[in-house]
Amino acid sequence: MASRTVDLWAEIVGEEDNQRSVGVPEPEMAVIYQRKKAEVMPQKDVARRQSNSSSDNGSRKSIAPLTRVSWNRSLSTRGRTSIAATACVDHQPQQRKPGRKVKPPLPRGKNAQPPNFDKERAYFQEVDAFELLEESPSPKKPGTWTMGAQVDNVVIPHLSSVLQKWLISKKLNRKYAFPGSLSRILETPVLSKDPICHDSFSSSTMKKPGKDYPEVRLSLSSLQQRSNSSLNDKQFIGIPIQETCEDIEVEVRKLSLTSRPSSLDGQGWNSFTALLTACGQSVPSTLTEMLLSYCDRGTITKIGEGTYGEAFKVGNNVCKIVPFGGDLRVNGEVQKKSEELLEEVVLSCTLNYLRGHEGEVSNACTTFIQTVDLRVCQGYYDSALISAWEDWDGKYGSENDHPKDFPADQCYVVFVQEHGGQDLESFVLLNFDEARSLLVQVTLGLAVAEAAYEFEHRDLHWGNILLSRKGSATLHFILEGKKLQVTTFGLLISIIDFTLSRINTGDDILFLDLSSDPELFEGPKGDKQADTYRKMRDVTDECWEGSFPKTNVLWLQYLVDILLLKKSYERTSKDERELRSLKKRLNNYNSAKEAASDPFFSDLMISE
């Protein structure tokens, strides 16, 4: 018997076409998957089924088409293109998607810290603040740029048009631009900054953030004249710039910001040369020359010392002598670099501006020590200074190395400052009123500097606060335009030593990266000064460039502890409770400006 070929696909299509032609609606198919329960079949039904299956062999032919039709219809409802594929696929239950990974719970007692985006925010703020003078200007004459065509009357800007401001600003601007300042120099006017040692110096010549000053341009030839002028030259007259492109190119070729500060023979413009210019010098002087300009050398006495330098009373002033740039270690420490001293010079001159009351000013105080003069010196330590150092060593026992060990090529920066009196460690307070006067003057001084320059001292221990009794019953402050008169009880405060300080001069943010000195934070636990350094590190999260006025509040709390624990003066138990309450309330303030509004100071300040 010949086998008959069955076209399965044709039967499926034909059956569907017949249903459409007679108008039979296609039933909705719903597939439900469930587990079939096992049924127990009665014994008589089992016997009947077995007899039916053995006696009737033709029943399969009648059942087969029905089974085939049902199977075909189910396939057609799934789509014809999937018949061949779905016929061979084993349908498996869907796998459960893995859940989202959950962070492990924090250990008990530790709070979750939110992400800190301060660095990213500062970066984009700096990018947003930078304004181009002209964004990618298109050529006014398109023909200049076509297929190598050249127009004779087109003037190509010379190199000097780009670097002229920069070179002059590096040589004349007191607030020298540190990393990242070239862009600001190219878009801001050049400022003339006369050296602080000049007679013509005035606080009005200092640039303050937010103020505009007239542009003063100087020629490179005048720079050369200034370099060759004597140290006693008191006047410097600006003349218009001439287009000396060749001189500019020579200066650019000489430019070297990475030169060794102690290399004085080179003509390159480096941080040492910038330091000289900031002090109004073309070459270093000797310590002897500097001393003779202020007093008889025989009257010099040593009055203090620090890790990086010595302090001597010279006439009516104090000279802080800081060695830098040499290979010899100073008191076990590497000597400071010229760029570090340059920042301290700029910072000291900037704080001098707060002493000016000329015209309408928003912030003013006399709390910070006045810098009278600045000098760069080179050579051996002067014999009068060595004699004064040895006298001090015999009386008090110096912790510093003997200065006679400095070589002939050693360089120093000399800060000539007013005599502010004795430091708090050695000064004898008389009563609780003087203790209050100390706190209110320091708090208001920090508040004024915060408002003017985002200033943070960051090292205000009791050796950096000088006190004197000069008979002034009141003192005047200006805080954000508000004039205040403060009762002093005859006590005058001066804050010194800005080595670790942070300030925004309006041109640059000057700061010291304290994370490079981990030993600063390794002091003994329980020591108030060492604890304050560690608290500062927690507040700043070691982002020392940022503005964190809370650090000033930490040092105010330190001073309260000193007045409670270290200083002896006439006071009552009520006075001590007031100090403890003040220290507790200081926890709620984030700046010295906020702390100045505390009730502890209310009866000491009067608005004018």
Image: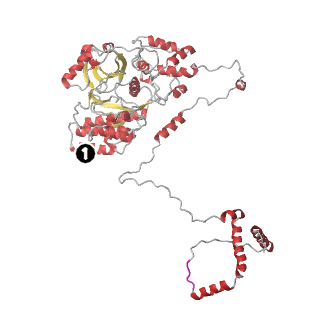
- Whether residue 539 sits left or right of residue 433 in the image: it is right
Residue at 52% x, 28% y is 184
For mark 1, what is the residue?
Answer: 577
Residue at 78% x, 70% y is 14
320 vs 299, nearest the viewer: 320
Q: Residue 590 falls in which quadrant of the image? A: top left
Residue at 80% x, 72% y is 21
As drawn, which residue projects farthest toward the right?
21
Residue 272 at x, y percent in the picture: 41, 20
As drawn, which residue projects farthest toward the bottom?
44
Q: Residue 136 falls in which quadrant of the image? A: top right
Q: Residue 475 falls in which quadrant of the image? A: top left
In the picture, which quadrant includes the C terminus?
top left
In the displayed structure, would residue 137 be above or below residue 575?
Answer: above
- Whether residue 355 sits left or right of residue 168 in the image: it is left
Residue 571 at x, y percent in the picture: 21, 40
Q: Mark 1 is on which residue type?
A: Arg
In the displayed structure, would residue 76 be above or below residue 539?
Answer: below
Residue at 53% x, 59% y is 97
Residue 471 at x, y percent in the picture: 27, 27
> Where does the magenta region start and end?
37-41
Label 1 SS: helix
As drawn, which residue projects farthest toward the left?
395
Q: Residues within 10 Å of mark 1 (few under 14, many from 20)?
A: few
